[in-house]
Image (cartoon, coloured by chain):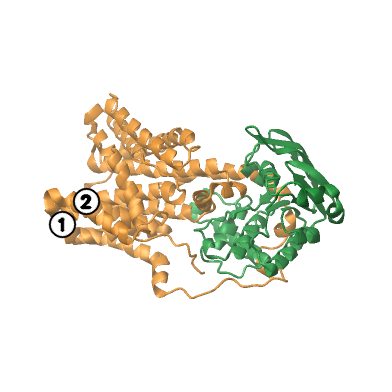
């Protein structure tokens, strides 16, 4: 009953991806807030002075209807091959909406408490992967301590809710503040480092956060925080709430990826010096990615705390960071649909394999290796080819 | 009127003096070539101007504004765009996205616009794409602009890099060996392209080894050797300068 039961759920949250039409509320505005300051200021360094010197001459004066104005030059817009049916389907937001629909219908197929719990966990994991995809996939910053932000979100919300008898929703503003601060505190000193050094330092920070939670009295030490209030009535209600939040978060992350800031992230990933030469303040842009990732992770932490109603340092180990990273790599770095699928596979597969008892993690590992050998670019890789409009 | 003014520029790496008192200036809308044997310090000078290297001493000013100590993105923000000697495109990204990088500094779009897909988001994305097409047309790119930049031929990649720099709407464009690796026909097209860029009102500083191109296109030529400037003048005068002839043909080897 587990296997087939979860299967429909699997594509489910990925659909979350499509939620584009719902206005991003939960994760995004704050996300944008801090990210905004990043990108805004990055342009600030240049823009103010840039526009005047920016030589209104060549392009400034000419209308954006550019291609017509050059006259003398060859005017070939590249090869315009019609997109194949498959690529249309993949690019289409309908694929995402269909996935969301599957997620919404899944409880009608199998609504045992076990299945709902697994599906809810998978959805939360999707949100984590979407957040890490901003940092690792879009911006190319290898973060081995992502669970730190997950922990900051879960603990902030859990501790505040239990100590002050607050409803969980009321802790969200504090969670946002705490995760942004955590993002800046961890990011500001480390983002000057390049790749491998950054990985080592983030690994260290991840452990520091976990060990701190383990030793502080406020966080309940090794036994953690328990009795965290629920966010919704009953597991079905909470499942739908989670799917809604995750859908908005995934859509928000995907939208960020298709923006001026998202392009700047990719420029940094591809070539930092060239990005800098084109006026991208690489440090601020990287910090914006880090803060966005922190917010996504922190809000996922709130959902996590509400889901389990008890949290302990054991939930935020290096293994958790590694699993999220694995989801991103498995799905396809920088590809939001891929990452969603990767996260679902990583979170559901061990449950499907549960019948194998002790051997299940062995088989889980073998399957991952096989997938990565067969599809090193990920299950649904990011396209280099731009969609024709 | 002077646009870029470099005075007594010095740059040393440890004990090695890469640039030893270089002075030159570039007027608005002027084409200036910087030539010299390999290792003369041409690219180092570019890197000092664009903020990638911090000069040991000297002055660099753009329209009277000191550029020293600014990070490269801030220099770009003042209207300086450059290309690289060994192409630095964003290989995995589409050709269009590469050129869109040039619009980063002037595109008005906040994170809220992106998250909510406001009309301003749609407008700015449209403008950004139109601009990318415009500059790819301007440089005459024939290859697939929707595909990844790494799939283009070498010459096409060079054009894309120039288009990316132009999309920034610079007042000063630094081209580092744009003709390297181009065939005869492509060089002729490059010559025309450089003139058309100048006609837009953009000043150009050109590092180039191809003397035919340099003599044809430049209004002024600055000659460097061992980090020093040994000549500065009109192409026909520089060509006859004994110090230049010696640097190129005389005592020391050059590639």
Chain in green in the render: B
- Residue A305 percent across, percent down from the top left: 28, 40
Q: Is residue A164 visible?
A: no
- Residue B171, numbered label: none
Q: Residue at x 49, y 67 (%)?
A: A387
Q: Disc 2 and disc 1: Cα gap in Å?
A: 10 Å
Residue A26 is situated, as x and y percent measured from the top left of the image, at 40, 47
Name the image quarter holding residue B97.
Answer: bottom right
Q: In the rendered image, which residue does mark 2 sit on?
A: A118
Write down the chain letter for disc 2.
A
Mark 2 is surrounded, within 10 Å at the Cα level, by few (under 14), some (14 to 19) or many (20 or more) other residues, namely some
The mark tally for this picture is: 2
Chain A palette colour: orange
Above or below A241: residue A63 = below
Query: Are the residues flagged by discs 2 and 1 in contact, CB closer than 8 Å?
Result: yes
Which residue is outermost to the top?
A217
């Amino acid at each position: 009953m587990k296997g087939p039961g979860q299967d429909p759920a699997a594509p489910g949250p990925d659909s979350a991806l499509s939620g584009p039409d719902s206005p991003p509320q939960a994760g995004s505005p704050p996300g944008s807030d801090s990210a905004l300051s990043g990108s805004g200021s990055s342009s600030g360094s240049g823009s103010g002075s840039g526009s005047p010197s920016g030589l209104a001459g060549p392009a400034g004066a000419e209308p954006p209807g550019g291609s017509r104005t050059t006259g003398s030059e060859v005017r070939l817009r590249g090869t315009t091959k019609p997109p194949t049916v498959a690529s249309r389907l993949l690019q289409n937001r309908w694929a995402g909406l269909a996935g969301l629909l599957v997620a919404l219908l899944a409880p009608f197929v199998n609504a045992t408490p076990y299945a709902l719990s697994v599906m809810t966990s998978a959805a939360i994991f999707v949100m984590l992967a979407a957040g890490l995809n901003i940092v690792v996939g879009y911006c190319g910053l290898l973060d081995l301590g992502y669970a730190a932000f997950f922990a900051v979100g879960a603990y902030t919300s859990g501790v505040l809710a239990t100590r002050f008898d607050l409803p969980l929703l009321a802790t969200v503003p504090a969670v946002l503040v705490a995760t942004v601060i955590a993002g800046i505190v961890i990011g500001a000193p480390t983002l000057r480092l390049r790749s491998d050094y950054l990985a080592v330092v983030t690994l260290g920070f991840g452990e520091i956060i976990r060990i701190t939670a383990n030793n502080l009295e406020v966080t309940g030490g090794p036994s953690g925080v328990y009795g965290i209030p629920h966010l919704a009535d009953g597991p079905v209600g909470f499942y739908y709430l989670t799917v809604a939040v995750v859908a908005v978060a995934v859509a928000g992350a995907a939208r960020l990826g298709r923006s001026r800031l998202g392009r700047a992230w990719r420029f940094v990933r591809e070539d930092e010096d060239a990005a800098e030469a084109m006026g991208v303040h690489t440090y601020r842009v990287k910090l914006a990615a880090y803060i966005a990732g922190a917010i996504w992770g922190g809000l996922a932490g709130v959902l996590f705390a509400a889901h389990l109603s008890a949290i302990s340092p054991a939930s935020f180990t290096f293994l958790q960071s590694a699993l999220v990273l694995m989801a991103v790599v498995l799905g396809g770095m920088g590809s939001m649909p891929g990452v969603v699928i990767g996260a679902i596979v990583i979170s559901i597969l061990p449950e499907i394999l549960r019948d194998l008892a002790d051997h299940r993690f062995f088989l889980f590992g073998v399957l991952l290796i096989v997938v990565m050998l067969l599809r090193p670019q990920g299950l649904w890789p990011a396209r280099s080819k731009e969609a024709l409009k | 009127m002077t646009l870029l003014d470099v005075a007594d520029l010095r740059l040393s790496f440890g004990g090695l003096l890469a640039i030893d008192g270089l002075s030159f200036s570039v007027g608005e809308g002027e084409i200036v070539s910087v030539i010299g044997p390999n290792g003369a310090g041409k690219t180092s000078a570019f890197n000092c101007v664009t903020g990638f290297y911090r000069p040991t001493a000297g002055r660099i000013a753009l329209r009277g504004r000191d550029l020293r100590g600014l990070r490269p993105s801030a220099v770009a923000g003042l209207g300086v765009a450059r290309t690289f000697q060994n192409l630095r495109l964003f290989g995995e990204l589409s050709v269009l996205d590469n050129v869109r990088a040039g619009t980063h500094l002037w595109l008005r779009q906040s994170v809220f616009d992106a998250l909510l897909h406001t009309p301003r988001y749609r407008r700015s994305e449209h403008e950004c794409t139109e601009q990318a097409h415009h500059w790819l047309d301007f440089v005459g790119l024939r290859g697939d602009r929707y595909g990844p930049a790494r799939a283009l031929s070498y010459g096409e990649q060079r054009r894309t890099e120039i288009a990316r720099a132009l999309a920034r709407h610079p007042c000063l464009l630094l081209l580092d060996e744009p003709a390297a690796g181009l065939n005869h026909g492509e060089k002729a097209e490059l010559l025309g392209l450089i003139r058309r860029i100048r006609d837009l009102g953009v000043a150009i500083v050109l590092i180039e080894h191809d003397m035919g191109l340099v003599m044809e296109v430049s209004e002024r030529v600055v000659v460097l050797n061992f980090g020093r400037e040994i000549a500065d003048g009109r192409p026909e005068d520089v060509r006859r300068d004994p110090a230049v002839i010696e640097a190129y043909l005389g005592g020391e080897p050059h590639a």
